[in-house]
Image (cartoon, rainbow, N blue to C red):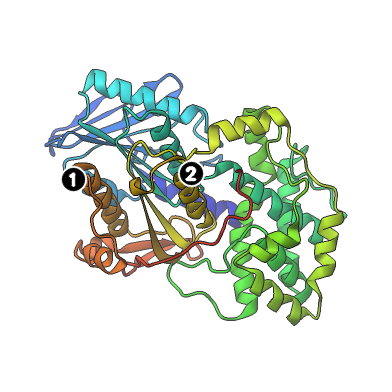
């Protein structure tokens, strides 16, 4: 399987938890816990009740899934987090969403509400319901709370591309630059693809070839910088120092824009939206580069290649642009962009170097300042690379921050020193992290840190 797709599948595998429930309602008599599974409409669901329920429900929304994901409904981002919550008396539930894979932005909130209705009718009404989500599910959890303030009492949004429309535009920017600079003569459709897999493979082949020369690496750095793609992709090792290694790790993360959110991913998105919702008409890529965290990497790479980025930026300016279908753009804006209203407290957790770039957090904070209450929001960061690479201890501490805010009406102390100490006290069984490049788990120290994300390059508003 292609490496980019394998990495994305690993993300989904991790977040799915790989816990497969039986088809019919059942109980676990040896533990006293109760398990419920079944189907509501076209969506499979799973509910786990603890032995002694504290009255709280955590409703989990899963990440973006690609075709070929194995079955199994996770109830948290990590299985250890799931087990800790159950042990602490929290009920857990998740819908697998109708259709399961792709941009289920419109269907997922409806499926979660249907599951909540079922729980209230068949098990009991929770005293409070917390929406927990990772990656795409983080954005969906924020939207669920905004649109159902009477039913959702708090949100924990992990590693979320919170501006989903802006995220798709950033992916278009990256693939547009890759095609223009690395494969201008190739038959590659970025939107409305006639041969999605062929277009994605042509982009990936161009990236692989570009990595072999200084000139190609410089252009890769420019394309990645236009999407603010980090040049660090290891949860276990520090950011590399060598220029070629930094660009190689950037290319590994940029591959997500090619495979998940490039031509193949757009087939599903465009079917749901009724057309292409993404655009780059009128975008000034010189200005976008000037705002990018990776602009210094671009300068270094072009100097090493003996080139001037101005010539390639001119090529981008001259290339034909992509226009959105207005109705499709409206669909994505309606279903994939939170307003920033905060009827319930929201806590976010993001890695400092993530393919779903941390600038989403700065964008969301700005929306909250305009449309909600900043007092309802706390944003936490783990100084680590790659997507959703948190230890269970970091996730548990983040959830406890939210639970404290809901219970007491006040946020607890959230300094990195305090949070790292709390995470460390949970023990080594909660202190591992998954590293995508090596496809392995390893111990990792708590990594809460102070961090200020860059300004968003392509916000939807």
Q: Nearer the viewer, residue 287 or 155?
A: 287
Mark 2 nearby-residue class (10 Å; few <14, some 14–19, many ≥20): few
> Which disc is residue 408 wearing?
1
Q: Which mark is residue 175?
A: none
**Residue 137 image position (x, y, % from top left):** 44, 41
Which x, y percent locates residue 208? 71, 64
Answer yes or no: is residue 418 visible.
yes
Along the line of sight, the residue nearer the viewer: 48 or 359: 359
Q: Closest to the observer: 142 or 238?
A: 142
Sequence-first tag of 1 and 2: 2
Q: Position of residue 123 (x, y in %)?
A: 21, 23
Location of residue 226 (image quadrant)? bottom right
Q: Is residue 209 left or right of residue 257?
A: right
- Mark 2, secondary structure of its residue: helix
Quadrant position of residue 306: bottom right
In the displayed structure, 279 sits above or below 256; it is above
Is there CB contact under 8 Å for labels 1 and 2? no
Q: Quadrant of the C terminus?
A: top right
């Amino acid at each position: 399987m292609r490496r980019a797709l394998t990495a994305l599948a690993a993300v989904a595998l991790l977040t799915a938890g790989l816990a497969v429930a039986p088809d019919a309602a059942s109980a676990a008599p040896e533990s006293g816990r109760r398990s419920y599974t079944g189907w509501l409409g076209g969506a499979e669901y799973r509910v786990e009740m603890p032995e002694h329920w504290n009255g709280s429900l955590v409703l989990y929304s899963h990440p973006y899934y690609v075709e070929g994901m194995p079955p199994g409904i996770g109830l948290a981002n990590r299985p250890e987090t799931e087990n800790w919550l159950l042990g602490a008396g929290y009920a857990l539930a998740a819908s697998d969403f109708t259709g399961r894979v792709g941009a289920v932005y419109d269907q997922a909130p409806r499926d979660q509400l249907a599951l909540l209705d079922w729980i209230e009718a068949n098990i009991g009404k929770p005293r409070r319901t917390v929406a927990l989500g990772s990656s795409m599910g983080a954005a969906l959890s924020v939207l669920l709370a905004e649109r159902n303030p009477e039913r959702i009492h708090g949100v924990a949004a992990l590693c979320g591309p919170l501006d989903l429309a802006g995220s798709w535009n950033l992916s278009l920017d990256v693939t547009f630059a890759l095609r223009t600079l690395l494969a201008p003569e190739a038959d590659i459709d970025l939107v409305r693809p006639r041969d999605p897999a062929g277009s994605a493979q042509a982009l990936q082949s161009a990236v692989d070839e570009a990595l072999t020369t200084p000139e190609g690496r410089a252009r890769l750095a420019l394309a990645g910088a236009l999407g603010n793609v980090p040049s660090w992709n290891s949860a276990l090792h520090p950011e590399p120092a060598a220029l070629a290694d930094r660009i190689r790790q950037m290319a590994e993360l940029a591959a997500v824009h090619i495979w998940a959110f490039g031509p193949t991913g757009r087939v599903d998105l465009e079917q749901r939206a009724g057309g292409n919702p993404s655009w780059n008409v009128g975008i000034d890529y010189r200005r976008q580069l000037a705002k990018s965290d990776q602009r210094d990497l671009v300068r270094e790479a072009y100097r090493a290649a003996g080139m001037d980025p101005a010539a390639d930026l001119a090529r981008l300016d001259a290339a034909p642009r992509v226009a959105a279908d207005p109705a499709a753009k409206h669909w994505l804006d309606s279903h994939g962009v939170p307003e920033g209203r905060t009827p319930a407290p929201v806590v976010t957790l993001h890695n400092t170097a993530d393919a779903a770039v941390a600038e989403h957090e700065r964008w969301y904070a700005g929306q909250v300042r305009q449309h909600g209450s900043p007092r309802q929001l706390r944003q936490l960061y783990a100084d680590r690379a790659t997507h959703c690479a948190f230890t269970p201890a970091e996730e548990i501490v983040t959830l406890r921050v939210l639970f404290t805010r809901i219970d007491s009406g006040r946020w607890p102390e959230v300094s990195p020193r305090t949070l790292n100490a709390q995470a460390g006290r949970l023990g080594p069984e909660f202190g591992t992290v998954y590293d995508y490049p090596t496809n392995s788990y390893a111990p990792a120290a708590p990594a809460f840190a102070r961090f200020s994300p860059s300004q968003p390059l392509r916000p939807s508003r």
